[in-house]
Image: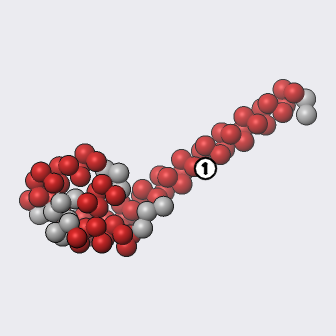
Amino acid sequence: MKSKGIAYLLWLISFFGWLGFHRFYLRKFGTGILWILTGGLFGIGAFIDLFTLGGKVEQYNTKVELTSIRKSTEASAKMTEARLKAGI
């Protein structure tokens, strides 16, 4: 799980988002590199990130949780299927 506090801290220490450290933290490597090369899309994207970063962290965390739920559900279904085939 990613933390909003750490994401905002990275935004702050990367010269108010211009270097895109917060994007690397959220595993957005493509836009992280773009932020470094363009200065946070000339500051406009970095400013927008100030207001949208919390939602991006929540979106990342939701994606990770859903992936975990899917994996455990699939594993449970496979175990149930194996037990039914074995007649247990």
Classify 9 as above or below 59: below
x and y, in percent, of residue 10 in the image: 28, 67
Give the residue displayed 29% in from the left and 61% down from the top: 22
Give the residue displayed 48% in from the left and 61% down from the top: 1
Front residue (pair 24, 54): 24
x and y, in percent, of residue 86 in the image: 87, 27
Image quadrant in which you'd find residue 75: top right
Is residue 45 in sight in this rendering?
no
x and y, in percent, of residue 52 in the image: 29, 65
Q: Going by the image, does 12 lie left or right of 1?
A: left
Front residue (pair 22, 80): 22
Q: Quadrant of the C terminus?
A: top right
Q: Residues within 10 Å of mark 1 (few under 14, many from 20)?
A: few
Is residue 72 in sight in this rendering?
yes
Classify 8 as above or below 83: below
Image quadrant in which you'd find residue 13: bottom left
Q: Residue furthest front?
A: 13
Give the residue displayed 90% in from the left and 29% down from the top: 87
Q: How many numbered marks appear?
A: 1
Give the residue displayed 33% in from the left and 66% down from the top: 7
What residue is pinned by disc 1? 69
Q: Going by the image, does 48 lie left or right of 43?
A: right
